[in-house]
Image: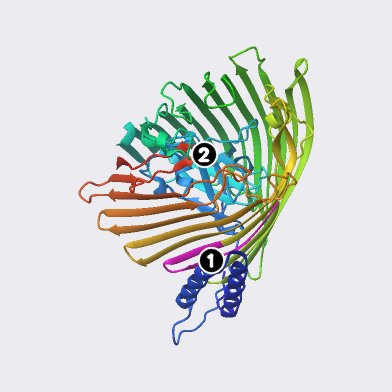
Amino acid sequence: MRRAKGNEGKSAFLVTFLVKLLKFAYGSFVATLLSLASLILLVKSAPASGSSIVTTEKVTVFGTRVSADEVDIAEQTAFITVISKEEIASRFGTAGDVLASQSSIQVRDSGGIGAFSTLYLRGSSTQQVNVYLDGVLLNNVVSGTVDLGRISLNQIDSIEIYRGAPPVQFVHSAIGGAVNIRTGSLTGENRADLTLGFGSFNTQKANLSGLYSLTPRLSIQGAVGYQASDNDFEFVNDNQTPLNPYDDRTEHRNNNDVEMLSGLVSGRYQVSDSESVLLRIQRHEKKHNIADLFNSVDTASALDSDLTQVQLYLNQDDWQQGAYTIGAFYGRVEEHFIDRQGRVGIGRQDETSLTETFGGELTGLQLVGDLQVSASVELKWDGYKNQQKIGDSPDQEFERYSAMFASQSDYAFADGLAIWQAGVRVQGIRDDGQQPGDNGLEDVSDSKRYFSWHTGLRWDFSPWATLKGNLSRGIRIPRLSEKFGDRGLFIGNPELREEEAINLDLGVTMASGDFELTMALFLRWLDDAIVAAWDSRGVGRFENISRAEIQGVEFDATYSPLEWLTLVGRTTVQNTENTSHISDQRGNRLAGHYDHAHYLSGTLDYADWLLTTEFEYQVGGYYDSAEAAAIPDKTRVNLLVQWQPGDLPGSLFSFEARNITDESFEAFNGYPAPGRHYLVAYNQFF
């Protein structure tokens, strides 16, 4: 419910305040952009001459029935982005490729289609961002990282990006935020989809998926996908001597091929109008050869992984003015990393690892007038086994038992114009493992409890504008390798405290007709960050000795000046500063984070044709904490052409040209990215 009366004064005050704040923090350029956008919206929202201002009737804010484990995006105070299936369909690549163009997101990869890639959000590290697959946490309990290159686009239905503290449906606390990757939906009519594609570097893609209702109550879905690429693109090899151009030579990338196979089977049985049972089984297999920094011809390093996930849930969507979801999940990740020549990792390695996860969760929400209360409980066991095939190192085994509780209240007031949100999280863990000691591996056990909170406010102060503000304390629990060590390369530290951060963001979302703009200012104060301290033997021990401050502003804008033209712009400007007492790092920028990132696209939709041009630009930052190695600027222009002929119902032909200007740049820290390359796909919808 919104009221128009009196909003002009509120709008002018807010716009003036934000312009002054941003001008002070980031200079006149950003403030000018906001001023122009606000002027457009004020003009478009002003009532026409002779028109009257109408006060709408009060409506129920929390009136929509929704599953307890689903997040109602429209009611959240946080800044959330949802990437729809339409933006993913027919494209090559992985989840990392789609996320890379979003504001405040940086994806680091090893170069090429399907490359190993990790996610950074609002200046946070990859371990400080929780990544979920259909609501199940993927972050490894030992390393904390997630390879987004493992999840191809074949079965992805949507991707949700939660900046800052996520809602309690995701029970784990996070410092940077969370990303939830959703696979195929079991709603809608019977359908099937076939995709075939090929492209440069012997890239191949095939996918078949379908949804079918066996009875009015029972629906099943299946999908299988394949994607592969040799990734043998041309690049200029500087032999790791960037200051000596005389040993540079043009080569093809060696030992960089990727092969992925994915499958999904799911079913939903509608017990009643409000109760359903869901079973989902999926598998993602990836074989990835890894090139070394020198592009050696005889390198034989590889990382093979196999992810299996099973979920069983009961949803009750209409229970005592509320809803609940109860379920169980199982995850299994097998990995084999081989680097017997010692050219990629630390030393010579040939190791296999098995990570298993088993747990149960209960999520519920209850409506009490203008108050909605949500809560989640999760009990989980994580097990990890590692075997090194080189040398006489003993096997390592870790276990983590977790009990987590999260509760959140959403209160609607001011005639439904505003929502205040507050939530808490309590996490208790017990870790059992083996720590390298003087007499080999020694058994170690440790138990701790952790606490975090968040609060936020959203205010629909105008028919076309919403103000949002959020404050939270997020944490990152130490990983098992940080607490128990890793085969003598790192000494464990069971006394490690959690990393903690205070996050603050403030922004506005404005929408009027064919123009939308979201602008947010974000701040983070990070303390007790975990870093490795090295002794004279070259052995590391993790310590809580680092601090940092991150400031930034992000813009997302969409404008359709004509029925057949859509323009999209995204900008992120951020400043990171190491505020620890480490003498050679204090005052420097955090390693690996860009200073500015910009994305522009234009889409022409005419008759049976869709033409999209993309421009990506990243600048600033350093690879290292000492600010000795600058990150090279990245500029890339892409082109996407889609044709859906009217005389071939359900057919879609796609053509992608990536990096059409053939720019030479690094994917990240010495790993080259492909030059100009082409991809062609055919989709048939039934």
- Residue found farthest to the top: 392
Element type where label 1 sits in the image = helix
Q: Is residue 509 magenta?
A: yes
**Callout in the foreground (2, 1):** 2
Say the numbered circle drawn on residue 30.
1
Q: In the drawing, what numbered circle is on residue 669?
A: 2
Q: Give percent across and percent down for residue 101.
A: 46, 50
Magenta segment, principal secondary structure? strand
Q: Which of the pair 360/140 is nearer the observer?
A: 140
Whether residue 352 is in magenta: the answer is no
Residue name at image x 44 percent, y 30 percent: 263
Helix, strand or loop at mark 2: loop
Q: Which residues are magenta?
A: 502-519
Residue 618 or 309: which is nearer the viewer?
618
Look at the picture and state if 51 lies above or below 167: below
Mark 2 is surrounded, within 10 Å at the Cα level, by few (under 14), some (14 to 19) or many (20 or more) other residues, namely some
Image quarter for residue 324? top right
Mark 2 and mark 1: Cα distance apart in space: 29 Å
Name the residue: 56% across, 27% down: 345
Residue 70 x, y percent position in the rendering: 57, 48
**Point 57% across, 44% down: residue:** 592
